[in-house]
Amino acid sequence: MRLGGKSMHSLCKLEWLCIIGMALHVMVGCASTPEITWTESKSKPQWISQVPLELDFLYFVGSASRADSLESGIQSARHAALSKIAGYLGTDIESEFKMANTESEQNVGESLKANTKAFVVKAISVDFYHKKMTRIEGNSQLEQYDVFVLLKYPKREATEEFIRRQTKDESTVYAAYNLYQTGKEYEKENKFTLSKKYYRDALSLVGQVRTVVPLDEDDVADSQELAILLTRSEENVIRQLRRVVVWVVEKNHDQTNTPSILGAHLTAVLTKHLFTVLDLTPPKDFEVENVHQLELKDKKPLLRFLKSQGAQFLIAGNGNASSRSFTMNNFFYEAQGTLRVFDIATGDTILTLPIQQRGYDRNEKTAGMNALREAGKVAGELLVNEFLSREET
């Protein structure tokens, strides 16, 4: 049956939708609105916005927002104020404030004293203020606290702490300077491993000093300049320890590449990691393409020559890029070969690295070059990891 162009079935659906809409409207209208009230412990004190000024004490304010309880809010606010005192004294105790709020204030003080040797435990609680937010919604009730704490700290203690820290920082910086001088002496004697150790230990000491400490030395003005010199010196001896020679012979589609693409990208990776790659030409009787059969220790004149150039390692090998397939209008090439790493001091082989990497391009020659390029990059990263792991042992 149709009525006014609409069926009875459509009218029934429309009526049901209206009824559901009205019901939802009534339910929403009847839903309780949250009741939020704020109560204060007292009138908001002036010290929250302007700390007191006093001859014998320094004042610090700490705050905490939306704490679940008044006790935890006071604890967090006190920690925040102590952190400000520590910052004023130049002491890093932030990590100490990560302990649980349930830990007693006495334990917090003892931990701060033991771990920072600062006189933060001398801080005196002066006053606190809080606002409590109560939220009631239906049968549930939520309480949260905004808390402010005022601490005072004796100026005499602050002065003593400054003197103690200044004395300690000066001793630390001069100890680092002495290590720097020893490192320089070892560097002059080409004892680079020992030199690096002294530079690194000195950097560790300087890193413990948070302020710029003057040095009464002709060659170094202060701790900041010392840190820069130590960083440069360490990098220099690392480069001396990583003096390498790279000799690679390669072919791309039966054509010899000179210079080697694989070798060039291998060298680029090494250089990025503070390796010094010496530009030396292999002797005519040195068959790099047969490096897998080479016994370098038997070639005494070559070893003497490499040592005279300050080389620590020889990286020698071969690569050959050959066609593998032609797919989707691209040539796919694969670079294969072998790299061997020799310790110049002994002539021993310390690593053999097989080469196998693919590359592609619409141009056939470029596809082979891409394969060799990728092979050089991958081999470089593998060699760097190997060298670094050996330095750490």
Image (cartoon, rainbow, N blue to C red):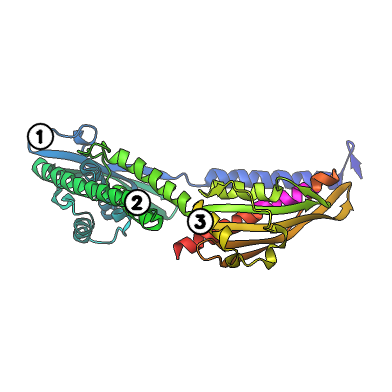
Q: Quadrant of residue 290?
A: bottom right
Q: Percent from the top left, x then y, of residue 368?
A: 79, 49
- The C terminus appears in which quarter of the rendering? bottom left
Identify whether 48 is placed above or below 258. Answer: above
- The N terminus appears in which quarter of the rendering? top right
Identify whether 194 is placed above or below 257. Answer: below
- Could you classify mark 1 by the number of other residues whose Cα lies within 10 Å: few (under 14), some (14-19), or many (20 or more)? few
Which residue bears the numbered disc 2? Answer: 199
Tell me the SS state at disc 3.
Answer: helix
Inter-mark Cα distance, 3 to 1: 71 Å
**Front label number (3 vs 1):** 3
Which residue bears the numbered disc 3? Answer: 307
Q: Percent from the top left, x then y, of residue 302?
A: 58, 58
Magenta extent: 368-377
Q: Earlier in the sequence, mark 3 or mark 1?
A: 1
Which residue bears the numbered disc 1? Answer: 54
Q: Percent from the top left, x then y, of residue 330?
A: 86, 47
Inter-mark Cα distance, 2 to 3: 25 Å
Q: Nearer the viewer, residue 308 or 134?
A: 308
Q: Is residue 281 left or right of residue 148?
A: right
> Residue at coordinates 70% horizontally, 45% vertically from top-left?
259
Q: Amino acid at mark 3?
A: Lys
